[in-house]
Image (cartoon, rainbow, N blue to C red):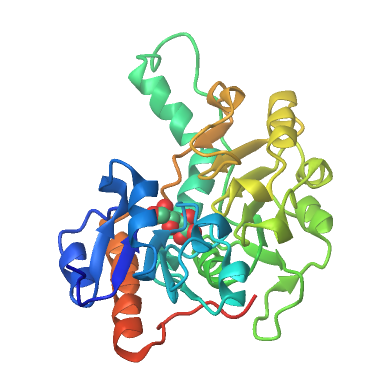
Amino acid sequence: MTSPKPALLQLLPFPFPHTQERLAKHFDVIELWNAPDAQAVIDARKDEIAVLVTSAMTPTRAELIDQLPNLKAICSQGVGYDAIDVKHAQQKGIQVSNTPDVLNDCVADLAFGLLLAAARKLGHAERYVRANQWGGDVAFPLGTKVSHKKLGIVGLGRIGMAIAQRATGFDMEVRYHNRRQREDVTLGYEPSLKELASWSDFLIVATVGGASTRKLIDQEVLRALGPKGILINISRGSVIDEQAMVDALVSGELGGAGLDVYEAEPTVPDALKTLDNVVILPHIASATNETRLDMLNLVLDNVDAYATTGKLLTPLPAL
Ligand code: 8YV
């Protein structure tokens, strides 16, 4: 018997118990990750599926979208949408939502965590203590002061602004690079990314991922940041030429790095794991109980809004 509710294809589980009940309020939920043969489920149910729930880390490509002739809305958990073929969906009249703003604080907090960890060698220092090296023959090396330094931000969007706000607490001078200068902020604008890198003590990458920013941070930018410079990335691995960064860190052309994201996650270049001037995290910038709950609730609110009004709450603009 066909369910009276339209179907919702959920690509991944969320670790909050209210999720399934909320989704099931208006939809017959297909838990794809539980299906022994995902393709068979899609083939059997494709005509019923009106809504798809996904995340910034779950590829949602044209090949999947094209198999769902009655798909009307894609609701994604996360602010980035480079893993979703948004333009393709929009051209087919499918609305796509992400979860902006609710993660700004946690992502900006982690950017500063990485900056402090890389500059003050926190990971290295912790390994030193755990290895019982404190008090031994090898003194722990001196770090780099953070307060009163120059911070460059690549991508002054909502997260970039939250990072700039935190920098004021460290009495830092802040400049930024965007494709266009923002009329609504008084921070120094640097039209050349290379110039920004050579001015900066620390460069934080907070721009969008995807084709428009691919390898924006290239060898030239890394050289401009220089042997004392520290690069922080909380955006997407694709924004940095990863091989050039690894080479620059190994050779000492770049001073250090604090990374939450990589080109081919969860693969982290082995060379990075051996370097003490690098802090490497497993893509956790938004990963707090509070923020992940807020992100999930925004997904659920988008799903409800679609069910009751036919419109998403936080739709992406037409690309
Ligand atoms: C992911 C992220 O959403 O928001 C983004 O763009 O990269 C992360 O916050 C999260 O890891 C997916 O669950």
- The image position of residue 288, as x and y in percent, is 31, 55
Q: Does any portion of residue 75 appear in the rendered image? A: yes
In the foreground, 211 or 239: 211
- The image position of residue 211, as x and y in percent, is 70, 57
Image point 79% across, 47% down: which residue?
221
- The image position of residue 130, as x and y in percent, is 34, 20
Q: Quadrant of the C terminus?
A: bottom right
Image point 61% across, 68% down: which residue?
88
Vertically, is 205 above or below 125? below
Vertically, is 199 above or below 165? above
In the foreground, 265 or 248: 265
Q: Is residue 295 left or right of residue 125?
A: left
- The image position of residue 182, as x and y in percent, is 70, 80
Q: Is residue 4 left or right of residue 210?
A: left
Give the quadrant of residue 103: bottom left
Image point 33% across, 42% down: which residue?
37
Answer with the quadrant where ligand 1 appears in the image.
bottom left
Image point 42% across, 10% down: which residue?
136
